[in-house]
Image: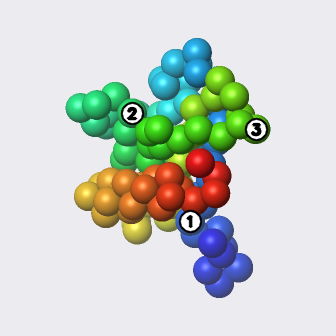
Amino acid sequence: MDVDDTWAVMTELQWWEEDVDVSTVVTANPETEKAAQSVDDDFFYTATGAVKLVKGCKNPDHARHLLYTSIQVNDSDLGHTAAMKKLSAAFADAVKRSREC
């Protein structure tokens, strides 16, 4: 999403091979390199970024892959850890209900 001709928020869907360690997915996404990890090991987030596994998502076009969502906020002044965690969870849930899965 662009706001006043400035990149503000970016969301992305990323298919990764099943055998790729989640730490690789996290470090490949800016804003989450030093992210807090959730208890269940599939959710990493900071005030300005998040990566979450879409559990149970299967797509025949992506056999042997797992789908992750990512969100990045460009302005650190807009970062909010609790809001990012909630937004990322809602985004992953919406993706799980979409045609992508």
> Residue 71's spot in the image, x, y percent?
52, 54
Would you say the residues marked 2 and 3 are in contact, meaning their CB atoms lie under 8 Å apart? no
The three-letter code of the residue at mark 3 reads Asp
The numbered mark, 2 or 3, whose residue comes first in the sequence reads 2
The numbered mark, 1 or 2, whose residue comes first in the sequence reads 1
Tell us which disc is closer to us: 2 or 3.
3
From mark 3 to mark 1, how far is it between C-alphas?
Answer: 27 Å
The numbered mark, 3 or 1, whose residue comes first in the sequence reads 1
21 left or right of 35 in image? right
From mark 2 to mark 3, how far is it between C-alphas?
Answer: 22 Å
> Residue 68's spot in the image, x, y percent?
54, 41
Asked if residue 26 shows in the view, the reply is yes
31 left or right of 46 in image? right
The residue under label 1 is 9
Q: Residue furthest bottom?
A: 4
* Secondary structure of the residue carrying numbered label 1: strand
The three-letter code of the residue at mark 2 reads Asp
The residue under label 3 is 61
Asked if residue 32 shows in the view, the reply is no
The residue under label 2 is 42
From mark 1 to mark 2, how far is it between C-alphas?
Answer: 22 Å
Residue located at (49% from left, 25% from top)? 22
94 left or right of 66 in image? left
Instruction: Please give the count of numbered marks on the rendered protein.
Output: 3
Q: Which residue lies furthest to the right in this view?
A: 61
The three-letter code of the residue at mark 1 reads Val
> Residue 61's spot in the image, x, y percent?
76, 38
What is the quadrant of residue 34 in the picture? top left
> Residue 27's spot in the image, x, y percent?
54, 30
The crowding category of the residue bearing disc 1, from other C-alpha atoms within 10 Å (few below 14, some 14 to 19, many at least 20), is some
- The quarter of the picture where the N terminus appears is bottom right
Residue located at (50% from left, 58% from top)? 97
